[in-house]
Amino acid sequence: MHWRLGLGVIFLAGAAAVAAQGVEPLLDQALAGEHRAEANRKRDVYRHPRETLLFFGLKPDMSVLEIWPGSGWYSEILAPVLRDKGKLYLAGNAIENPRLPAWQREAREKMEAAYAKRPALYGKPVFTSLGPPEYLAIAPAGSMDLVLTFRNVHNWSLQKTDALVFNAFFDALKPGGTLGVVEHRANPGTSFEQQIKSGYMTEAYVIELAEKAGFKLAGKSEVNANAKDTKDHPNGVWTLPPMSRGRLDPEKYLAIGESDRMTLKFEKPAK
């Protein structure tokens, strides 16, 4: 059951009954909600949010931390699912950092304001900051059931802060908790220099990062694989949509779609 209010689907009393049935009906409601912009819906075919979140083990009563949510593409799906029984933390760009570019500060402030205006839809997410190496207090230690990061690892590797960030993930998770990683996937054997240049990281490198932080690999999924992606584009992964850097041969790159991606699930050991 739902009631339509303004531009969004607001989950009311019926949500409690749906939640009792499990996460899938709530995910379906969130994905179909009128609060999602049409431009965001068009990315579903490339990002497979339903299958990805189910693979990572999302449940409505979890404490979940999304890392660098950007404009909220995944957050607008997660927040309604977790609103009634769970808790959502969003570790955005560190607005405490005086060196943070103005546009990133404005984007985070805009997102916080938008979510605060619609608690009946989004609940009350907790906004924290990630800005390595100084700002790593992303959640209370040992408090999260699930930490999620989507297409971010290459940024931290470029900054040489990826080990610090994975350690922060480990600290935030409860024993037995899960880290879900989606990242642009380089071909095996790609040099680290080329990974940084292209934005595509090897599975081996990401797995090694996680294991050095203390995680155990718990599973892989090919749900975000894209065999059309040749990974040899003039402007690296950013040549592809949605960024389409350089606007090179739009038909060619739109036909490829978004990047080939690894989808990895890690576990923080229970002891």
Image (spheres, rainbow, N blue to C red):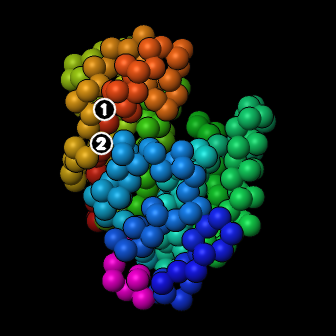
The residue sitting at 74% across, 50% down in the picture is: 110
Magenta part, dominant SS: helix
- The crowding category of the residue bearing disc 2, from other C-alpha atoms within 10 Å (few below 14, some 14 to 19, many at least 20), is many
Q: Which residue is mark 2?
A: 224
Q: Quadrant of residue 135?
A: top right
User: Which residues lie in the magenta part?
Assistant: 17-23
The verdict on residue 112 being magenta is no
Is 152 drawn above or below residue 139 in the view shown?
Answer: above
Characterize the local packing of mark 1: few (<14), some (14-19) or many (20 or more) Cα atoms within 10 angstroms: many
Q: Is residue 116 left or right of residue 185?
A: right
List the single residue furthest toward the top.
Answer: 234
Distance between mark 1 and mark 2 Cα atoms: 7 Å
Instruction: Identify the element where label 1 is drawn.
Output: loop
Do the CB atoms of the residues marked 1 and 2 lie less than 8 Å apart?
yes
What is the three-letter code of the residue carrying label 1? Asp
Q: Is residue 205 above or below residue 51?
A: above
Q: Is residue 223 left or right of residue 79?
A: left
The residue at which mark 1 appears reads as 260
Q: Is 141 in front, or is 255?
A: 255
Residue 125 seen from this side: no
Q: Quadrant of the C terminus?
A: bottom left
Residue under the image location 48 percent in, 13 percent down? 248
Identify whether 238 is placed above or below 122.
Answer: above
